[in-house]
Image (tube, helix red, strand yellow):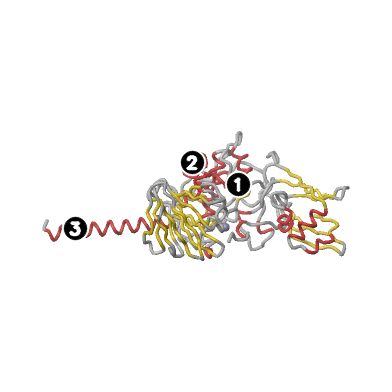
Amino acid sequence: MSSGRVWLATFLVWMLIGVCFKGWCAASERNTIRVGLLRFYKGAQSVTLSSDSGLTVTDATGRELISCEPEAVVVLSAEGGVLTIRSGLDVLSEAGSFVTASPRRPTSTVRIETLRQPVREYRGRIEVRPKACGLLLVNVVSVEDYLLGVVSAEMPSSYPDEAIKAQAVTARTYALRNRGKHASDGFDLCDTSNCQIYGGVSVEADRSTAAVRSTLGTVLFHDGRLAHVMYTSDCGGVTQDPSEMRPNSKFPYLRSVTEPPEMPQSSWEALFTLQDVRDKLIAAGVKQAAGLTGIRASKLGASGRVLEFEITTDSGATSISGTKLRSALGVNVIKSLLLSVEKTLGGTILFRGKGSGHGIGLCQVGAKWFASPPRNWNYTQILAYYFPGTEIVVLQPYDSSARTTRTSDQFVCPERKVETKSVPPGPAESGDRVGIELELRLNAPRGL
Ligand SMILES: [Zn+2]
């Protein structure tokens, strides 16, 4: 081969490598998700970062600002809306308004520590921006690694494997469908129950990790796009159709499902004095509650949840929504709106209820029951039960490129693997009941 041909061949090989590498990077970026770390770091004035492989800190242009040794710490603080970086004896003031801290070894993790929080660990990289109220930390992480810190946080790892797999598929579908939900805040999803609880490596559990890994790329589709899924900790025996409260929230696979009567149900009670209820309602902005004399459930939804309460006062009666009352009295006390109200002889008000949470979609304790002996349902059966009419799709190759859109059009599914859903005989789904109001994760206030 002549020297000219050698050079040409070498040039073409490098071009090919360059194209492939660029393509690989692009695909890799598309498979990441940007998670706003609000639960522990919202408003933090200073954070300390480190990694067992060392950290590299770059600015908005990708220029390297600092590269430190394994275990060395980098302190980032917001001073006057500008980032200041301290690493050893080096102080970089006016580092700009955006930096990224990446572990030197991509498979390593970043540890975050603040004055008020213990050390927590995250896969991927951490972006830091100064905001008016302090620092905003965003964890840029692969979708699959993100799920490791979600599934373990959202469902006990002691649950049966197939229940955890059902949770993993639901959480993955939620993440991809809602990617970009917080686009105006500078990230895709937050790490609170507003989106999905995410705790990073610090909360990962082996059985949850196994469930995520074994369902790689598996999501729920309906009508050719990602399904609009939700999940709830305990539906109290009957799930809720979100359209009962919001007519526009009609999804054929989110209709109310009544669980088998033999399934054990949890119950709870909450006792309040009239004065307690009055004070909490007033504190929540219900000024009419000043002369409160009584309260009753005045409008029930299809699943039996309270849509509206009527509060009687010295000057008449008025209505408040179920979610408003639940929020005012405490969502951890009034655990669900599947409840009854009793006024006792002593002038107190007793709420008796079943279940916990909004009651929409996958019921986690129900999934646990179905996956347990002697039923032994697998995760596809569980998902088909709570999301009837959806299909299970395995994204191959796993290319989740839709960052800000909520449609599935940009998903690449060259080999759609649709699994057969054989639902074991079960109870009929609930019939045509009417309305309920509740908190919807998607409609809850944003974290920022
Ligand atoms: Zn959120």
Q: CA distance from mark 1 to mark 2?
A: 23 Å
Q: Quadrant of the C terminus?
A: bottom right
- Outermost residue, top direction? 374
Other-residue count near label 2 (Cα within 10 Å), few / some / many at <14 / 14–19 / ≥20: some
Query: Could you say where residue 150 lies in the image, as x and y percent from the top left?
Result: 54, 48
* Residue type (three-letter) at the residue carrying disc 1: Tyr
Query: Could you say where residue 414 lies in the image, as x and y percent from the top left?
Result: 41, 54
Does any portion of residue 177 appear in the rendered image? Answer: no
The residue shown at (66%, 62%) is 247
Per the rendering, the mark at residue 385 is 1
Badge 3 residue CB within 8 Å of ligand 1: no
Q: Nearer the viewer, residue 124 or 306?
A: 124
Q: Is residue 78 left or right of residue 68?
A: right
Q: CA distance from mark 2 to mark 3?
A: 45 Å
Query: Could you say where residue 249 lies in the image, as x and y percent from the top left?
Result: 63, 60
* Residue type (three-letter) at the residue carrying disc 2: Ala
Q: Earlier in the sequence, mark 2 or mark 3?
A: 3
Mark 2 lies on a secondary structure that is: helix
Q: Nearer the viewer, residue 381 or 235?
A: 235
Badge 1 residue CB within 8 Å of ligand 1: no
Residue tagged by mark 3?
9
Q: Quadrant of ligand 1?
A: bottom right
Query: Could you say where residue 219 lies in the image, as x and y percent from the top left?
Result: 51, 51
Does any portion of residue 262 appear in the rendered image? Answer: yes
Q: Are marks 2 and 3 in contact (CB under 8 Å)?
A: no
Per the rendering, the mark at residue 322 is none
**Which numbered disc, 1 or 2, marks the residue closer to the eye?**
2
Residue tagged by mark 2?
210
